[in-house]
C-alpha cells in the first residue's frame, strides 16, 4: 500500500494548536507542522518488498497521487523499482559487482581492465536508471571503429552482467543491453599450413622444440602446456590435461585448476610427439622448485613443482617471455621457408594457441566427428566446437553429392560393358542349332550403340 501525506500539516493536531491561516479553507481547517513551508509538501509513504519504509516527496498533490498508484501497481505485480538505487552510478554498481563476484584470477584482471578502460569513461558517472538502450547502441558503434567484434563482445558481456545485477537488485526494470545489436563476429581462425608448423618446430630453440611439437600434436591450451609435469604417459601414449600454469596480471604464478570440468581429459599422442618429449626429458631434466598449487581452491598448498617446460633459468615460462621467443621463431621459420623456395609462410597473427586450431583442423580432415573433436579439445559443449570450426567440416552439399556418387556414380561406358557382358553370357549358354540355308543370320548389337556384339 502507498499513501499520500501532507508534510506541512498535522493529521492529528494536539489540543490547543492554532489553525494554519495560510492553507485553511472554509470547508477544511489544517494545522501547521514543524515542516510547514519546508521542502515539497506532498509525501508518498510505502514499504518496499524488504519491508523497509520508503518516502518520496512531490510539489503537487496530483503528482503524489499518481506516483502512489504506480507504486501500488508495481508492488502488487512484483515489479517494484527502487528509484534511489536507480540513481546509483554505474561505477558504484560495477565496483560492487567486480569485488563480490567469483572470478578466476586472470579473468578478474580482464574484468577490471574492461571496466576501467572501456566502460567507466562512458557510463561511470551516470545513474544506472538513466542509461538507455540507445546509449548502449551508440557505445557499441563507437567501439566498432576501434576493436574487433570478438573484443567488443567481451566488453559488452561485462556491461550486460552489471546491468543484469541492476535488474536483480530492483534498480531498473529492464536491462538497456537487451535488444542491442552487436557487430557480426568474423572468423579469426588462423590455420597454418603443415609446412609452416614443421618450420616452427625446426627453428624452435632446443628447450622449446618439444613444446611446439606437443602443442601441434595435442591441442593443449597454452596454460595447460606450461603446466605439464609428469602428465605424459609414454606407455599409454597419452598426455593428461589436469592442471595449468596461471600467470596473473599481478602476483606470483601458480598451478591452478582447468577452465571447465570438461577440460580435464586425456589426449592420444603420435609417436613423433612422444619421442620429442622423451628426448626433451633427457636433455632438460626437470628441476624442482616451490610453487603454490591451487588445483583445490579450498586447500591451496605450496609444493615442489617439476615442470616439463621451463625458461632458460629453469623457472616457469611467463607470457611476456614466451611472446618474445615466439616472435623470433616466427621470423626464423619464414626465413627457413624462403631459403627452401617454399611459398608457404607462417601467418603473422599465428600464436601458440593457433597450433590448437591446427590440431583441430587435422582431426576434422581425418573425418573425426564433432564429439571426438570436442573431447580432445576439452570444450564444455559440442556447440562451442561447431561454432568455431564449422567451416572446416565438409558441407552438406559436399557429403550428399559424395554419398550418391559412391552408389550411383557409374559411367555410361561401364554400363555398356556390363550390359554387353550379360548378353554374351546368355548367348553362350544357348544350345547350338543349324539354320536352313534360306535363313538370314541376325547378329545382335550392343544396346543403344548399333555396334555388333562380339561373341
Image: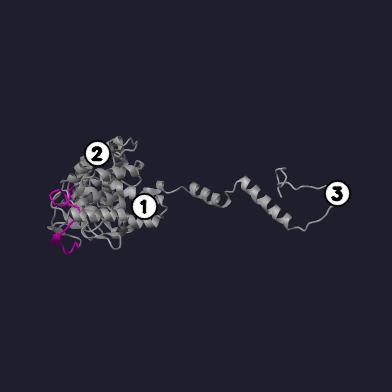
Q: Which residues are magenta?
A: 296-318
300 in magenta = yes
Q: Return the mark for residue 404.
A: none
Magenta stretch holds residue 151: no
State the count of labels. Answer: 3
Q: Earlier in the sequence, mark 1 or mark 3?
A: 1
Mark 1 highlights which residue?
A: 385
Q: Which residue is mark 2?
A: 332
Q: CA distance from mark 1 to mark 2?
A: 32 Å
In terms of secondary structure, where does tag 3 sit?
loop
Q: Position of residue 419 (x, y in %)?
A: 67, 51
Q: Helix, strand, or loop for circle 1?
A: helix
Q: Earlier in the sequence, mark 3 or mark 2?
A: 2
Q: Secondary structure at mark 2?
A: helix
Number of other residues with Cα within 10 Å of mark 2, as a class: few under 14, some 14 to 19, many 20 or more: some
At a point 28% along the width and 56% down the height, the residue shown is: 274
Q: Does the CB distance between marks 1 and 2 fall below 8 Å?
A: no
Can the viewer see residue 111 in this picture? no
The secondary structure making up most of the magenta span is: loop
Q: Please give the residue where the numbered disc 3 appears in the rendered image.
A: 439
Residue 328 appears in the picture as rendered: yes
Q: Position of residue 127 (x, y in %)?
A: 22, 45
Does 252 sit above or below residue 51?
above
Toward the viewer: 48 or 4? 48
Q: Which callout, 1 or 2, points to the residue nearer the camera?
A: 2
Q: Is residue 33 left or right of residue 355?
A: left
Q: Quick check: 209 left or right of 451?
A: left
Amino acid at each position: 500500500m502507498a499513501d499520500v501525506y501532507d508534510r506541512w500539516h498535522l493529521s492529528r493536531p494536539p489540543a490547543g494548536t492554532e489553525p494554519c491561516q495560510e492553507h485553511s479553507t472554509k470547508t477544511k481547517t489544517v494545522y501547521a507542522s514543524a515542516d510547514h513551508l519546508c521542502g515539497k509538501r506532498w509525501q508518498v509513504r510505502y514499504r518496499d518488498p524488504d519491508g523497509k519504509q520508503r518516502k518520496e516527496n512531490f510539489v503537487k498533490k496530483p503528482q503524489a497521487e499518481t506516483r502512489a498508484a504506480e507504486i501500488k501497481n508495481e508492488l502488487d505485480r512484483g515489479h517494484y523499482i527502487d528509484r534511489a538505487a536507480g540513481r546509483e552510478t554505474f561505477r558504484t554498481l560495477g565496483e560492487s559487482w567486480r569485488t563480490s563476484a567469483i572470478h578466476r584470477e586472470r579473468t578478474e584482471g580482464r574484468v577490471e581492465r574492461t571496466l576501467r578502460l572501456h566502460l567507466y569513461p562512458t557510463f561511470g558517472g551516470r545513474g544506472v536508471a538513466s542509461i538507455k538502450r540507445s546509449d548502449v547502441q551508440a557505445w557499441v558503434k563507437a567501439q566498432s571503429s576501434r576493436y574487433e567484434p570478438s573484443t567488443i563482445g567481451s566488453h559488452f558481456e561485462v556491461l550486460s552482467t552489471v546491468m543484469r545485477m541492476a535488474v536483480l537488485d530492483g534498480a531498473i526494470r529492464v536491462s538497456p543491453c537487451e535488444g542491442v545489436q552487436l557487430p557480426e563476429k568474423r572468423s579469426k581462425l588462423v590455420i597454418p599450413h603443415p609446412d609452416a608448423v614443421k618450420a616452427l618446430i625446426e627453428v624452435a630453440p632446443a628447450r622449446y622444440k618439444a613444446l611446439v611439437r606437443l602443442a601441434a600434436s595435442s591441442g593443449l591450451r597454452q596454460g595447460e602446456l606450461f603446466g605439464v609435469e609428469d602428465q605424459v604417459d609414454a606407455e599409454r601414449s597419452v598426455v593428461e590435461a589436469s592442471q595449468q600454469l596461471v600467470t596473473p596480471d599481478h602476483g606470483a604464478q601458480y598451478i591452478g585448476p582447468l577452465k571447465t570440468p570438461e577440460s580435464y581429459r586425456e589426449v592420444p599422442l603420435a609417436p613423433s610427439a612422444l619421442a620429442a618429449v622423451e628426448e626433451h626429458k633427457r636433455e632438460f631434466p626437470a628441476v624442482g622448485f616451490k610453487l603454490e598449487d591451487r588445483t583445490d581452491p579450498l586447500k591451496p598448498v605450496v609444493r615442489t613443482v617439476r615442470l616439463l617446460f621451463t625458461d632458460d633459468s629453469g623457472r616457469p615460462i611467463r607470457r611476456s617471455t614466451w611472446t618474445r621467443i615466439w616472435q623470433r621463431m616466427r621470423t626464423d621459420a619464414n626465413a627457413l621457408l624462403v631459403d627452401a623456395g617454399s611459398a608457404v609462410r607462417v601467418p603473422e597473427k599465428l600464436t601458440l594457441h593457433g597450433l590448437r586450431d591446427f590440431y583441430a583442423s587435422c582431426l576434422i580432415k581425418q573425418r573425426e566427428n564433432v564429439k571426438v573433436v570436442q573431447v580432445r579439445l576439452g570444450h564444455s559443449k559440442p556447440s562451442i566446437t561447431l561454432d568455431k570450426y564449422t567451416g572446416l567440416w565438409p558441407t552438406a552439399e559436399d557429403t550428399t553429392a559424395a554419398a550418391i556418387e559412391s552408389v550411383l556414380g557409374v559411367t555410361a561406358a561401364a554400363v555398356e560393358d556390363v550390359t554387353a557382358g550379360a548378353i554374351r553370357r546368355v548367348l553362350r549358354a544357348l544350345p547350338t542349332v543349324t539354320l536352313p540355308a534360306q535363313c538370314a543370320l541376325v547378329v545382335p548389337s550392343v544396346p543403344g550403340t548399333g555396334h555388333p556384339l562380339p561373341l
